[in-house]
Amino acid sequence: MKKFEVGNIRNVALVGNGGAGKTTLGEALLFTAGVTTRLGKVDDGSSLLDFEPEEKSHNLSISTSLASFEHRKHKINLLDTPGYDVFLYEAQTALSAADVAAVVVSAEVGGIKFETEKLWGYADGLDLPRVVFVNRLDKENSRFEAALGALAEGFDATFVPLHLPIGAESGFRGYVDLLRMVACTFGDTTGKPVEGPVPAELADAARSARDALVEHLVETDDALMEKYFDGQEIGAAELSRALRLGVLGRQFVPVLVGSAAKNIGAGALLEFLVDAAPSPADRGEARGTAPDGAEATRAPAEDAPFSALVFKTISDPFTGRLNIFRVFSGSLSSDSSVWNVTREEEERVGQILTLLGKETKPAAAATAGDILALAKLKVTGSGDTLAAKAQPIRYTLPSPPEPLMTLAAYPKARGDEEKMGQGLRRMQDEDPTLRLGREEQTHELLVSGMGRLHLDILCERMKRKYAADVELKRMKVPYRETLKGSTKVQGRYKKQTGGRGQFGDTWIEIRPLPRGEGFRFVDKIVGGAIPRQYIPAVEEGIFEAMQGGILAGYPLVDVEVTLFDGKYHDVDSSEMAFKIAGSLGFKKGAVECKPVLLEPIMEVVVRVPDAQMGDVIGDLNSRRGRVLGVDPRDGTQEIKANVPLAEMLEYAPDLRSMTSGRGTYTMKFDHYDEVPPYAAEKIAAEVKAERGEA
């Protein structure tokens, strides 16, 4: 693809909740621009943008796809993003690379979905200009006025329709272009409208809507407003310029209408992007950090020092890594070198690529404002900054959200542990919301993500890409045991087999320690009751016995054991004999010391809308939680509680159900605490059943 001036580039992120029709709209844009020869569809797997096999099988977008194409001598970099909550970080990072957000909203009755609310908030944080496309107006129960009202109620913005729909539901056939006051109707899916006069039944509504539109447009320019109030005619070119100014200044959000599936309205959106959407030059300087920590900026100009941010990495077992990056300043040519500021390493650049879904084509160069890809970089990954080594600057992506669900990963085939681990690490390079860990106590490999769907699709991709068949199971809770009482007890081991025997005799005192103290061994042997060389063996035997527990086989913690007396035999005593004696003594004494089960208690912070606070607190109480406090935060309530980990393993879908997806939470380990007796008995019984014990 040829090189484009920065003013002729449009970086557009299609965002909105799952099911709103973003990918279908993206396909309509590509078809209308002449990039494709047929209108791709998500449902039949012919979509160019949803090209991953898992996207086709689940009929949903899993990751952001890039389609770069030319229209009216402008380059449009279209970022089609996922809209389901477990994949929203993909959309968030795409917004960081975009200059305008095209928010796709379904006209079907039901209001604004929570995913759209989150995405709108992300765009607010980036000060991104927006345009709304009200989609699916051909569907049953679709209402343009209701959708417009929901937008006005849900967001702090002024929404200004550029179109009025003609017809409703199955009778929807086009729109009135309020700027030009012409009717655009569509009889097929070519995307080419038949223009004509405004239908008589819409004449009054169209005039009123146009008057409101013009009033908003003239407010963008004092001279234009004065001309308007003087009653002078305002030309189409002046209105078009005012529309662009209003979008750039975020004075209002234009609203377009259509049906992506029928290719109604995609052409109008395409023209809007060229005529009114901001270029990288319009967005101004990019802000980052210099090596000394001070703020640094880069102008979106080709003659500025090169700088770019990698916002997405795709891993493939055959082609390797593909890094998608947004150039903020300067230019980069193929077969050159670039400095990875994040990792402080030089990278050799091969061919620069432009993307159209999964298809790649060579690009002439990477210039300011553009979005392109690089293959086979050695160390570079998502979130890394590439820049001129002599003038480095560092940009950052939003931090990935904390995982909401953790499961244990097991290979389905024996001996595939290494293959599974390697595949998971490669998937983690591609997906920053994926976390890997190992629980030392249970010896489980833990995989954390944003929900069950996220983790299930991860396993599907692992099997396809790396031939690693993974099974996900509920993680084992790392319970512990401790003691509440004290005792003094003898541990004696004597064995005679005809030759040399085994003899060890110990007296120990067992007592509990404060929570978190661990294990303490105290040597109070005096007078050589036990020779010094055998005392470490006694400690070792006690420690090993603690690992097997007393109640349910979980490690014993927070215990002090004092060795204060014992006996030995000159011939039969040995380290092994004293190790066994110490172990026997501890096991016998621990039973007398009121053993109890401990469980990990998590610090949970739940943020929910005011209306759901009571339901969420009640649910936390039912999970044996203890609410520590509630703080109001910007129209929501932040609930802080301590809750046992065992009760939080599948909390994410329950919270989503209670709050219609608007609730969020974070969780981290806080402390261990005693399990109530009724629950401890149940846990012990489950452990015995797993072991096949009566």
Image (cartoon, rainbow, N blue to C red):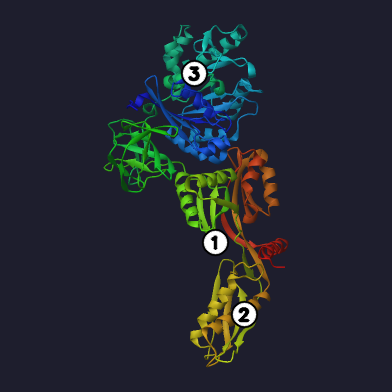
Upstream in the sequence, badge 1 or badge 3? 3
Image x and y of residue 680, in percent: 69, 63
List x then y, in percent, for residue 173.
59, 15
**Residue at 58% over, 31% down:** 19
* Residue type pointed to by label 3: Ala
Q: Earlier in the sequence, mark 2 or mark 3?
A: 3
Q: Quadrant of the C terminus?
A: bottom right
Vertical comparison of 692 with 486: above or below? above
The answer to whether any part of residue 630 appears in the image is no
> Which is more toward the observer, 565 or 468?
468
Residue annotated with mark 1: 443
Secondary structure of the residue carrying tag 1 is loop
Q: For mark 1, does the 10 Å Cα neighbourhood hold few (<14), some (14 to 19), or many (20 or more) residues?
A: few
The amino acid type, in three-letter code, at marker 2 is Leu
Secondary element type, mark 3: helix
Q: Along the horizontal axis of the image, is 122 left or right of 365? A: right
Q: Nearer the viewer, mark 1 or mark 3?
A: 1
Point out the tag, 1 or 2, that comes first from the N-terminus.
1
Residue 203 falls in image quadrant: top right
The residue tagged 3 is 268
- In the image, what residue type sits under mark 1? His
Q: Which mark, by number, is residue 584? A: 2
Name the residue: 26% across, 42% down. Answer: 390
